[in-house]
């Protein structure tokens, strides 16, 4: 039993022929009939000449035909596949013509020499499936016709994505991947090398237009930018020159050549003619286009280019099969003489060649084919697997149909896939029944490659990443440098051996194709106005922000406990700052505070020891004791401001300070009032006589102190101070400080102290000239002047200081004002008590300075 396949081959030579063969033997179908007249033969020859001039014989396509024949021969000789069935084939050449593709489809379906749509008269073995076409443009109309009848079609070269639409093309399958996966592969390769600034040139056809737009969309989504997207026109030299200039001016080092195979050569010829260097070309067809039509200039231009080629492999035994081809051994092969002439650059001497040489005007300079030439001596690149990728796909297509037929013949009764679990007879089946088996075929080749289709009739998307290199002898060599496998998880789909790549002479390392250089850590990207997102300026991160990666759009704020480093590339912990006892400033203030308190205590001891002397008893001895005690506490309360702030110290230090100082100023005020009352009461008929006594100073002192105590209590109840970690005052430190809570209460406290000091100052100033040797009014005046000066200057200094210096400012004010009171009021008295006891007498006190002398 014989099954028949059909293959729509691409252009192989000038005259489009049809051949068929059974059992692997080729037979001529369309040729110059020997029964024709002389004029008809001449017309056929002239037709041959026209096509020969327009279309050159392509060795790659010839390989594809023989790959199919080789596969069918293997299948027929394999007893494990279709043991009782012989596969035959018809070959019909579409010549890259959609019209011829439709014509051949109708011719094959009708089974007659004439095309009769919707009519079938199959006189020979039943037609099983159609393999082809190579070109997407001609595969589409074939698929539309075959889809009506659900007739299986397997293309080995059509890549246009819309052919995967099963609603429009229900019977179409292919052994090459959907071109959308190729676009994804290109994008992954570009991202692998960090190429984010890319140019795209496309051909003026469906493949170029649809593909380039999809490529732009996918690459943009991946983070790349398109420097230019230009379409090479078919007939517009001025536009071509304009596009060339755009490519020259562009800073993009990488250009994706997204064109159909038929337009690659003329486009690359234009680029080579204008000597565009310093570009890396990503070309799908770089290694699949026939080497014999690539000029030396084109090869130099395309040197170092990267290609995304369908994954392929050597067909076991196929190279030996090709080397075995010979005109004498295959007399029925109508293409073998053309192949021989193309491969060896010679001409066969026969009537046809003589006629061709005469018409073409050749002068006999071309060598004559002898038949003794050896295919093994041809350059290895002639049959390189990357120059004949589609050959392996045609080979796979033949095995796909054979395995589908094998699965059909192996169907077990009552376990079939059709209605009522039935099977179908391999000798009489409907096209849609074979289509079912083709859709579900799954087998392994001898090399271990899985062959199957997804729901859209597409095979697994696996590509080789190849690098075109010029060998030392000037020949083209395509090297596999990696792969792209869409079946792998994201991030592992691409694997490239960078060291295996040889770039063109303009690059000594992996080229950089960036609109703007990457922003280093510590910087962020700022898009340039009117430019794509890949064109940007690098702006340093702001204070307190950092970026620890390259090309970040935004800088990240550091946590409150951290700050950005000097390079803004990381966050570092902030230093904690407060006035500690270990700091030099803290040690200094602690020492001064301790010294002042000891001095005050020493003065108190001196006063207690000499308590019965006139100078101590003058101006209310008890108030002097209270004032010295309060000044001791004033000196010591500054210690509350030193050390790590805690809630207790924050709540107490300002309140204690204000109460103690109010107590001190109240004592000073009481002493001043005592002096005023004492000297005013000595005047005749003075009304102040009744106020003379110890009670009035006590009342004054208590009254003035209680007001400050009440302010402190209200402060602690309503809005008490608390510990605060201030991260705003300084950029690289955390200031641990006390927040005063209510700033109003803080001002009330300071204002009340100022009020008491002002009243004391005024009272002392008015009584400074009262007669008495031990009159304290003038000392109190000076002390209040110093006290007021300190606290008036304290306010601006306090609010301008930060961190530990803010606390130091207040401590300084406390200690300096305490020292002013001590030195102004008590040091002169201590001087008299200790060094001038002669002045510490009642007579001297009463104004008789000579009393002691007379005695």
Image: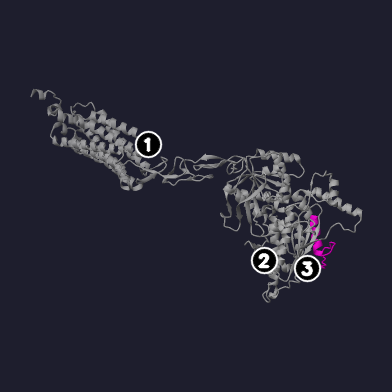
From the viewer's perspective, tell me whether residue 805 is left or right of residue 273.
left
Front residue of this view, candidates 462 and 439: 462
The disc at residue 801 is 1
Residue 608: x and y, percent? 15, 37
Mark closest to the chain's N terminus, 3 or 1: 3
Front residue of this view, candidates 146 and 128: 128
The quadrant the N terminus occupies is bottom right
Residue 429: x and y, percent? 75, 70
Residue 241 visible, this angle: yes
CA distance separating discs 1 and 2 = 84 Å
Mark closest to the chain's N terminus, 3 or 2: 3
Q: Which residue position is annotated with label 3?
A: 126
Residue at disc 3, secondary structure: loop
Front residue of this view, candidates 30 and 513: 30
Q: Which residue position is annotated with label 2?
A: 441
Q: Is residue 109 magenta?
A: yes
CA distance separating discs 3 and 1 = 101 Å
């Amino acid at each position: 039993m014989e099954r028949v396949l059909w293959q729509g081959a691409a252009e192989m030579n000038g005259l489009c022929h049809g051949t068929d063969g059974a059992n692997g033997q080729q037979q001529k179908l369309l040729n110059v009939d020997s029964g024709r007249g002389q004029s008809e033969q001449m017309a056929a020859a002239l037709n041959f000449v026209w096509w020969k001039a327009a279309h050159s014989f392509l060795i790659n396509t010839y390989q594809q035909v023989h790959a199919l024949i080789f596969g069918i021969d293997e299948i027929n000789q394999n007893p494990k596949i279709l043991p009782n069935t012989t596969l035959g084939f018809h070959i019909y050449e579409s010549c890259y013509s959609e019209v011829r593709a439709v014509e051949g489809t109708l011719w094959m379906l009708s089974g007659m020499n004439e095309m009769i749509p919707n009519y079938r008269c199959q006189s020979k073995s039943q037609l099983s499936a159609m393999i082809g076409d190579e070109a997407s443009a001609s595969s589409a109309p074939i698929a539309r016709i075959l889809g009506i009848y659900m007739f299986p079609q397997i293309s080995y070269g059509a890549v246009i994505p819309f052919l995967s639409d099963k609603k429009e093309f229900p019977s179409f399958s292919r052994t090459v991947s959907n071109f959308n996966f190729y676009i994804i592969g290109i994008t992954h390769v570009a991202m692998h090398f960090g190429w984010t600034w890319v140019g795209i040139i496309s051909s003026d056809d469906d493949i170029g237009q649809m593909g380039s737009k999809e490529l732009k969309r996918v690459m943009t989504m991946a983070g790349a930018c398109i420097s230019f997207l230009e379409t090479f026109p078919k007939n517009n030299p001025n536009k071509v020159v304009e596009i060339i200039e755009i490519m020259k001016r562009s800073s993009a080092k990488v250009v994706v050549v997204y064109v159909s195979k038929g337009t690659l050569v003329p486009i690359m010829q234009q680029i080579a003619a204008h000597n565009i260097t310093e570009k890396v070309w990503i070309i799908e067809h770089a290694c699949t286009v026939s080497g014999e039509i690539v000029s030396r200039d084109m090869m130099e231009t395309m040197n170092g280019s990267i290609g995304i080629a369908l994954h392929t492999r050597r067909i076991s035994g196929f190279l030996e099969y090709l080397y075995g081809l010979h005109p004498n051994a295959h007399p029925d092969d109508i293409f073998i003489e053309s192949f021989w002439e193309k491969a060896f650059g010679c001409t066969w001497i026969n009537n046809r060649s003589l006629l061709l040489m005469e018409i073409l005007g050749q002068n006999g300079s071309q060598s004559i084919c002898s038949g003794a030439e050896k295919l093994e001596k041809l350059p290895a690149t002639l049959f390189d697997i990357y120059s004949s990728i589609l050959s392996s796909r045609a080979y796979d297509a033949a095995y796909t149909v054979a395995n589908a037929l094998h699965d059909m013949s192996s169907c077990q009764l009552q376990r079939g896939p059709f209605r009522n679990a039935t099977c179908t007879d391999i000798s009489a089946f409907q096209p849609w029944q074979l289509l079912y088996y083709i859709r579900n075929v799954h087998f392994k080749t001898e090399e271990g490659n899985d062959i199957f289709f997804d729901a859209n009739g597409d095979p697994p998307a696996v590509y080789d990443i190849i690098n075109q290199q010029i060998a030392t002898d000037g020949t083209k060599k395509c090297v596999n440098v990696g792969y792209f496998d869409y079946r792998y998880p994201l991030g592992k789909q691409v694997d490239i051996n960078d060291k295996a790549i040889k770039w063109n002479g303009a690059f000594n390392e992996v080229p950089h194709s960036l609109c703007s250089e990457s922003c280093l850590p510590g910087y962020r990207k700022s898009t340039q106005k009117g430019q794509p997102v890949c064109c940007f300026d690098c702006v340093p991160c702001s204070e307190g922000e950092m970026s620890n990666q390259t090309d970040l759009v935004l800088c990240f704020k550091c946590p409150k406990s951290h700050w950005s480093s000097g390079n803004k590339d990381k966050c570092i912990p902030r230093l904690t700052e407060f006035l500690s006892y270990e700091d030099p400033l803290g040690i200094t203030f602690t020492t001064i505070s301790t010294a002042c308190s000891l001095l005050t205590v020493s003065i108190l001891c001196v006063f207690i020891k000499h308590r019965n002397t006139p100078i101590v008893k003058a101006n209310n001895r008890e108030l002097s004791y209270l004032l010295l005690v309060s000044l001791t506490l004033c000196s010591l309360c500054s210690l509350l401001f030193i050390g790590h702030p805690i809630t207790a110290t924050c709540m107490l230090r300002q309140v204690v300070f204000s109460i103690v100082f109010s107590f001190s100023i109240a004592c000073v005020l009481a002493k001043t009032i005592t002096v005023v009352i004492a000297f005013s009461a000595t005047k005749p008929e003075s009304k102040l006589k009744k106020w003379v006594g110890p009670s009035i100073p006590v009342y004054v002192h208590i009254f003035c102190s209680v007001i400050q105590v009440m302010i402190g209590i209200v402060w602690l109840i309503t809005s008490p101070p608390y510990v605060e970690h201030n991260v705003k005052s300084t950029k690289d430190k955390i200031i641990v400080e006390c927040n005063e809570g209510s700033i109003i209460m803080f001002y009330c406290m300071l204002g009340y102290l100022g009020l008491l000091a002002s009243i004391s100052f005024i009272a002392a100033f008015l009584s400074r000239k009262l007669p008495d040797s031990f009159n304290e009014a003038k000392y109190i005046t000076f002390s209040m002047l110093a006290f007021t000066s300190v606290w008036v200057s304290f306010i601006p200094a306090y609010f301008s200081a930060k961190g530990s210096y803010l606390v130091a400012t207040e401590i300084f004010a406390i200690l300096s004002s305490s020292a002013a009171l001590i030195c102004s009021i008590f040091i002169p008295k201590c001087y008299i008590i200790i060094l001038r006891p002669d002045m510490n007498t009642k007579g001297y006190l009463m104004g008789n300075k000579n009393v002691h002398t007379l005695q």
